[in-house]
Structure formats: C-alpha cells, structure tokens
Amino acid sequence: MGPDRKITKYPRAATLAAGLFWLAVWQLAAWRVGQKIFLPSPLSVLESLWQLVPTLSFWGRVGFSLLRIAAGFGLAAAVAVMLAGLAAAFPLAETLLRPLMLVVKATPVASFVILALVWMPSRQLSVFISFLMVLPIVYAATLQGVRQTDRQLLEMAKVFRLSLARQIRAIYLPGAFPYFSSACSAALGLAWKSGIAAEVIGLPEGSLGEALYQAKIFLVTDEMFAWTLTVILASMAFEKLVMLVLRRLAARISGEEGRP
C-alpha cells in the first residue's frame, strides 16, 4: 500500500497531521520574527482567545454577525430559487436577469459596501452584502439543475396529467436539489468572507468586523488573530449546520428518510 492510499484511508488523521505541520511552521516563524506585534505565536493567540471567550461582549459579537450573515444567506438562497424557477419558466425573465447577475458577480465587495452605506445603516450591511454575494451563485446552479431535469419524466407527467405542484415535488425538486446543495456549500464561505469584510468597512457597533478593526488600530495583533480564528470557527460551525439540514432535506426529497 503506497503513501497516497494510506492518506486516502485515514483522511482525518492526514488532515490533523497537516494542521499540526502548519502550526509548527507558524510557531517557528513567530520565533524567527521575535516580535509579537508582527507575528504572535499560536499559544499567545489561544491565550487571547481564552480571555475573550468568557466575556459577554465576545458572544454578543458572535451572535450579531452570525444572525445577520445567516439571514443574508437564507434570503439569498430563497430568492435565488424563486428567480431560477421564474427564469426556467419564462425566457424573457432569464434574459432580464442575466446582466443583473453578471454585474453582481463582477462588482468588488468594497464597492457594494460603500454604496450600501449610503442607503442603509451599517448594522444591516452584512445582511445585504452576504445576500448579494450568495444570490448569483445559487441562482445559476439552481437554474442549471432545473434545466437538467429528465425530459422523459416531464413527458410522462404530461401523459398522466400531473399538476404543476406534483411535477415540482416529484420531478423538478429531486433533479435540481443536488445543484442547489452544491451551490450552497460553495457560497457559505463567501457569505462569511463578504459579510465580515462589510463589517470591517462599515464598523457596525458590536460586530466581529468592528472587533477585528479595533484590534488592528491598537496593534493588538494576538487579539486580531484570535478574532480571525473566531470568524473561522463560526463559519465552519454554520457551514456544518447548514449542510446537515441540506442532507436531511435531500434524504426526505429522495424518500430515503426513515428507511432502515
């Protein structure tokens, strides 16, 4: 058995070993730099995080950003599905939506943040930016999934005169859901990156982005790393929760839920 097969057989152990390797590289780099203000060690970052975790302000900031980014993601997913269905049913709708989606995908996050600050309070900024970044990804994937629906099944539905609601439930939904799920998986990380970036620029009070900016302004580098680690962990936890929900929905749609 070669080394590649061993890595494939034990992916978690390989991932843990790779993580430990990069932590060692980080520690060596911190020793080499020798200045905490430029590059704190992993231990100092963990110590800073350990001091932040018991405070109410820490959990308040996590909740602030989590709720808003989750709201932006959820709204984007729902609107994207509705727009994809509309575009699949009416070619004119797709034609009208195409340039809009291209503009949203091509415009830098910072430009949207600056424009949005003119229209809305900074506290709602991460909702809006997360929404915009997720919308075109989920829309494009869902529309593709709808178009990949088995035409023979649709012809059969016409023969048996199935209602549109039953066609959606029995044909379109099982066919398009894998595309939707994959798009959500890809968009989750982007929602967090763009949402936190919006908070760093807009500085809404009580947000993770504001904490990151303040740590940078006061040159508390280990705390800045600790807040960054918090963002990563919150993003990973949110992604696992969403993917768990999507897997259960997929099982329910496919009829596998409850089978032995």
Image (cartoon, grey):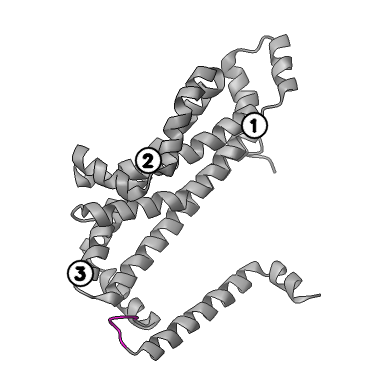
Residue 216 in sight in this render: yes
Q: Which mark is residue 175?
A: 1
Question: In the picture, residue 40 is in which quadrant?
Answer: bottom left
Residue at far right of view: 1
Question: From mark 3 to mark 1, how far is it between C-alphas?
Answer: 50 Å
- What residue type is disc 2 on? Phe
Q: Amino acid at mark 3?
A: Ile
Amino acid type assigned to the residue bearing label 1 in the image: Gly
> Residue 232 location in percent, x, y?
41, 62
The count of marks equals 3
Side of 142 relative to 154 (left or right): left
Instruction: Say above or below: 136 vs 187.
Output: above
Q: Residue at x 25, y 41 (%)?
A: 116
Confirm whether the magenta stretch covers residue 59. no
- The residue singled out by tag 3 in the image is 217
122, 38: nearer the viewer: 38
Which quadrant is home to the C terminus? top right
110 shown above or below 25: above
For discs 3 and 1, the disc positioned in front in the rendered view: 3
Badge 2 local density, few (<14 within 10 Å), some, or many (20+)?
many
Residue 124 in view, yes or no: no
When asked about the image quadrant of residue 70, the answer is top left
Q: Residue at x 27, y 53 (%)?
A: 199
Q: Quadrant of residue 205?
A: bottom left
The boundaries of the magenta stretch are: 35-39
In what element is the residue under mark 3?
helix
Which of pointers 2 and 3 lies earlier in the amino acid sequence? 2
Q: Foreground: 174 or 109?
A: 109
Q: Which residue lies at the image location 21% right of the left edge and 37% below the top edge?
A: 119
Residue annotated with mark 2: 131
